[in-house]
Image (spheres, rainbow, N blue to C red):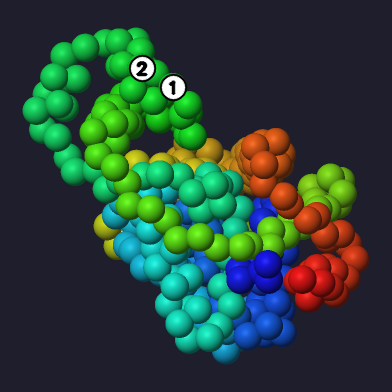
């Protein structure tokens, strides 16, 4: 069966956007971002939107929400499939690119999810029990969690229970079938570390701190900014006087390296669970490799 979608994944700073744009130009495609933070307006430098790279290539799921608005794997999955349908209706090829493994996995393995409303009665009930009891209730309702971070904070834990128990009683809408070519960019670890550090220096020099300060002045609380992690968390702490400039760079640089390792762990997990990833040499001609794989069908 001929591929009808291309998915590009890889660790942060590996060049996913550049490859996606080149493939979209070669194959008549449009790009869907699979990034949990690029959906937010004004979060440009810290998320690496690099919109200048897209040129005439149309893109989706970028700049669709204001900071503080809710975005999650359910919304991503729904909007991603909707964008894929719209792109194909124009006779174009969907090219999904990003490093948020949970979002990519939700599309590739077709997580069966339903839109879950707020249940005030349930929340009032759950407010009265301990976090340990909440964890046990979530485990009973959802033994195979996709995202274990839901168990780390009480509010998220309550929401996870709300979702899991609602899903038990409601059948999700079937997802449309598709046949993706999944491409991963692989870069030697020491080289990737250099790329991450160089990119962070460039982002700080091009206004990352000013971007976070502007977002705060426009109404995004420091608590919200910290919830977006990495660049926004550490710069928010710097702006609040909790870190000096040197600590900002050192701690943030270390955190991004750790994040890249976690991405690699997630991608390996996807492979163990049945996703076939064709790994490209990030130091070689990844475009030619990708085109050969796509045209071989």
Q: Is residue 221 visible?
A: no
Q: Residue furthest right?
A: 284
Of the pair 148 and 276, the residue shown nearer to us: 276
Instruction: Tell me if residue 223 comes above or below residue 196 in the rendering.
Output: above
Please name the residue shown 36% across and 44% down the image.
113
Q: Name the spot of residue 252 as percent of width and height, x first.
A: 61, 43
Residue drawn at point x = 39 percent, y = 63 percent = 79
The local crowd at label 1, few if under 14, some if 14 to 19, many if 20 or more residues have their Cα within 10 Å, is few
Q: In which quadrant is the N terminus drawn?
A: bottom right
Q: x, y (%) of residue 274?
A: 67, 42
* Circle 1 SS class: loop
* Quadrant placement of the C terminus: bottom right
Q: Position of residue 7 (x, y in %)?
A: 63, 62
Residue 107 is tagged as none
Q: Of 161 and 17, which appears nearest the observer?
A: 161
User: Circle 2 sits on which residue?
Assistant: 140
Q: Specify the farthest residue to the front.
A: 1
Mark 2 burial class by Cα count in 10 Å: few <14, some 14-19, many 20+ = few
For residue 178, above or below residue 254: below
Could you tell me how far apart the alpha carbons at marks 2 and 1 are, in whole angstroms?
6 Å
Residue 130: image quadrant is top left
Q: Are marks 2 and 1 in contact (CB under 8 Å)?
A: yes
Q: In this image, 74 relative to 97: left or right?
A: left
Q: Which residue is mark 1?
A: 143
Q: Is residue 183 left or right of residue 206?
A: right
Which residue lies at the image location 23% right of the left edge and 33% below the top edge?
169
Give x and y (percent) for residue 6.
Answer: 64, 67
Q: Residue at x 48, y 86 (%)?
A: 90
């Amino acid at each position: 069966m001929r591929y009808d979608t291309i998915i590009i994944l890889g660790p942060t700073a590996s060049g996913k956007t550049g490859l996606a744009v080149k493939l979209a130009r070669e194959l008549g495609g449009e790009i869907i971002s699979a990034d949990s933070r690029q959906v937010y307006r004004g979060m440009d430098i810290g998320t690496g939107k690099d919109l200048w790279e897209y040129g005439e290539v149309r893109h989706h799921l970028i700049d669709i929400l204001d900071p503080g608005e809710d975005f999650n794997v359910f919304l991503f999955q729904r909007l991603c499939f909707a964008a894929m349908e719209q792109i194909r209706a124009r006779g174009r090829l969907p090219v999904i690119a990003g490093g948020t493994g949970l979002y990519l996995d939700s599309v590739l393995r077709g997580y069966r999810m339903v839109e879950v409303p707020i249940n005030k009665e349930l929340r009032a009930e759950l407010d009265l029990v301990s976090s340990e009891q909440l964890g046990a209730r979530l485990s009973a309702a959802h033994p195979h969690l996709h995202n274990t971070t839901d168990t780390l904070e009480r509010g998220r834990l309550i929401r996870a229970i709300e979702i899991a128990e609602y899903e038990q009683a409601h059948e999700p809408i079937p997802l449309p079938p598709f046949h993706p070519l999944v491409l991963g960019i692989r870069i030697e670890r020491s080289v990737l570390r250099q790329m991450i550090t160089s990119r962070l220096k460039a982002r700080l020099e091009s206004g990352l701190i000013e971007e976070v300060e502007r977002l705060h002045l426009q109404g995004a609380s420091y608590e919200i900014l910290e919830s977006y992690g990495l660049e926004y968390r550490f710069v928010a702490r710097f702006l609040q006087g909790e870190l000096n400039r040197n600590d900002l760079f050192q701690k943030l640089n270390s955190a991004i390296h750790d994040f890249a390792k976690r991405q690699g762990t997630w991608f390996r997990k996807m492979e163990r669970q049945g996703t076939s990833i064709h790994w490209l040499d990030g130091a070689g001609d990844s475009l030619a490799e990708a085109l050969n794989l796509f045209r071989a069908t």
